[in-house]
Image (tube, rainbow, N blue to C red):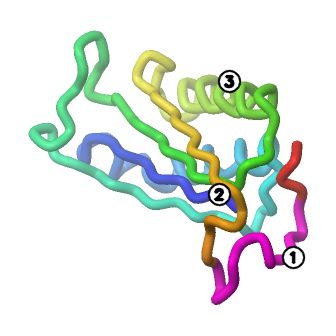
Amino acid sequence: MAQFTVYGRDDVLRPLRSALSDTLHAAAVDVLGLPVTKRFHRFFPLSAEDFPTPEGRSERYTIVEVTMFAGRTVETKKAFYRRLFADFAEHLAIEPVDLEITIVETPRHDWGIRGRPGDELSLTYRVET
């Protein structure tokens, strides 16, 4: 299980939302092993006033927060970062300097999904990769 929250300036994020979702999902499927049918993306387009650009970044500055079940290796997470940095630059014109990615992992028992604790769910994919 993984959920993705994306923050960016509204004038940049809104026109890219669909392509960004596709780019993010392809990396999550290929690198994290998520099923193609699991696409949990939330977008928060903010005004320039509410989402100031840090020094050294452009107006394309974007933050991706990933909350997911604990269990993936450091190597898998680093491969995911590398994939997003490359794909965001190639497909979305968001350069690595303008992309920040944070992964927050929690034990499965800390999730409540479909009326059950996460550690009681039967998954069709592996989390320990």
Outermost residue on the left side: it is 49
Q: Tell me which residue sits at (40%, 23%) in the image.
A: 98
Task: Please state the extent of the stretch shown in magenta in the rendering.
Answer: 113-125
Residue, disc 3: 82
- Sequence-earlier tag: 2 or 1: 2
Q: Horizontal placement of 27 versus 7: left or right?
A: right
CA gap between label 3 and label 2 equals: 18 Å
Residue, disc 2: 2
Outermost residue on the top side: it is 56
Q: Residues within 10 Å of mark 2 (few under 14, many from 20)?
A: some
Indicate the secondary structure of the residue bearing disc 2: strand
Magenta stretch encompasses residue 48 = no
Q: Horizontal placement of 83 versus 98: left or right?
A: right
Q: Position of residue 23 (x, y in %)?
A: 62, 44
Q: Residues within 10 Å of mark 3 (few under 14, many from 20)?
A: few
CA gap between label 2 and label 1 equals: 15 Å
Residue, disc 1: 122
Closer to the eye: label 3 or 1: 1
Indicate the secondary structure of the residue bearing disc 1: loop
Q: Position of residue 26 (x, y in %)?
A: 71, 47
Q: Tell me which residue sits at (62%, 69%) in the image.
A: 111
Q: Is residue 61 above or below residue 124?
A: above
Q: Residues within 10 Å of mark 1 (few under 14, many from 20)?
A: few
